[in-house]
Image: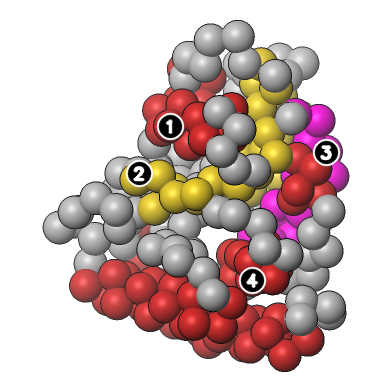
């Protein structure tokens, strides 16, 4: 069994090295790991840090740098093309989520209970999550559930895990943060069961590198509506 960990990266010079180190520190027993770094046109020295890292020569690490910044969705889609694992997991390049959660995230797939797992930030009570974040994410999740008959608690979670054949069979078009609602909508339209497991979350502020903006919420609503109206065919 092999786990492909896709890390979309954009201007994360302060955290990328530690994130990769944390990923390698995770003990998954006999499960093989590969790390795919998709640098989405970083301009802050992230590329140089990756190229000079001690782990870049590891054959289990694959790295690609886009000449321009396209968006998280584009970086994840690139990573999916390069993935060779039986299971694919998306790991953000910041420190908001903990790779030590991998065991719990892949367990439902290994047990044969599902082919898709989402890590929910809202299945655990966390006072550190700002009210605005809770309100926006829960509103978008509720909207998703209404449109597609889902029962999710955290549609926008960054921790999404798939059997590779499932995610590679989905036709993805979004290149930005709207990748999150797009993949969720298309999975629900395909009646693919999604199991959620609780995860810890350590949010950072905009001055610490947080990139998502209110306009991304508008984009999410647009994508959800478009998927509903077209049946996911766009």
Q: Are marks 4 and 3 in contact (CB under 8 Å)?
A: no
Give residue 199's mark.
2
Task: Indicate which label's residue lies in the foreground, 1 or 3.
Answer: 1
Alpha carbons under labels 3 and 2: distance apart: 27 Å
Q: Is residue 141 visible?
A: yes
Instruction: Please tell me how crowded label 2 is: few (under 14), some (14-19), or many (20+) other residues with Cα within 10 Å.
Output: many
Residue under label 4? 185
Instruction: Confirm whether the magenta stretch covers residue 79.
Output: yes
In this view, the residue in front, 231 or 22, is: 231
Which picture quadrant has residue 91? top right
Residue 171 location (% of width, % of height)? 83, 64
Residue under label 3? 82
Left/right placement of residue 196 relative to residue 163 reads left
Q: Is residue 37 visible?
A: no
Alpha carbons under labels 1 and 2: distance apart: 9 Å
- State which region is magenta: 67-85
């Amino acid at each position: 069994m092999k786990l492909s960990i896709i890390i979309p990266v954009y201007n994360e010079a302060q955290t990328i090295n530690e994130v990769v180190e944390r990923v390698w520190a995770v003990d998954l027993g006999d499960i093989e790991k590969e790390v795919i770094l998709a640098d989405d046109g970083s301009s802050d020295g992230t590329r140089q840090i990756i190229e000079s890292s001690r782990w870049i020569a590891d054959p289990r690490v694959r790295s690609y740098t886009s000449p321009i910044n396209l968006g998280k969705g584009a970086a994840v889609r690139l990573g999916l093309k390069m993935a060779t694992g039986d299971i694919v997991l998306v790991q953000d390049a910041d420190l908001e989520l903990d790779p030590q959660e991998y065991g719990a995230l892949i367990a439902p797939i290994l047990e044969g209970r599902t082919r898709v797992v989402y890590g929910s930030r809202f299945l655990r009570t966390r006072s550190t999550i700002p009210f605005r974040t809770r309100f926006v994410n829960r509103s978008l999740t509720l909207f998703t559930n209404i449109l597609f008959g889902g029962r999710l608690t955290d549609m926008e979670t960054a921790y999404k895990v798939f059997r590779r054949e499932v995610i590679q069979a989905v036709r993805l078009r979004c290149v930005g943060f709207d990748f999150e609602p797009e993949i969720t909508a298309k999975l629900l339209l395909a009646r693919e069961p999604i199991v959620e497991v609780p995860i810890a979350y350590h949010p950072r502020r905009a001055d610490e590198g947080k990139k998502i903006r209110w306009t991304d919420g508008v984009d999410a609503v647009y994508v959800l509506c478009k998927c509903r109206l077209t049946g996911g065919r766009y």
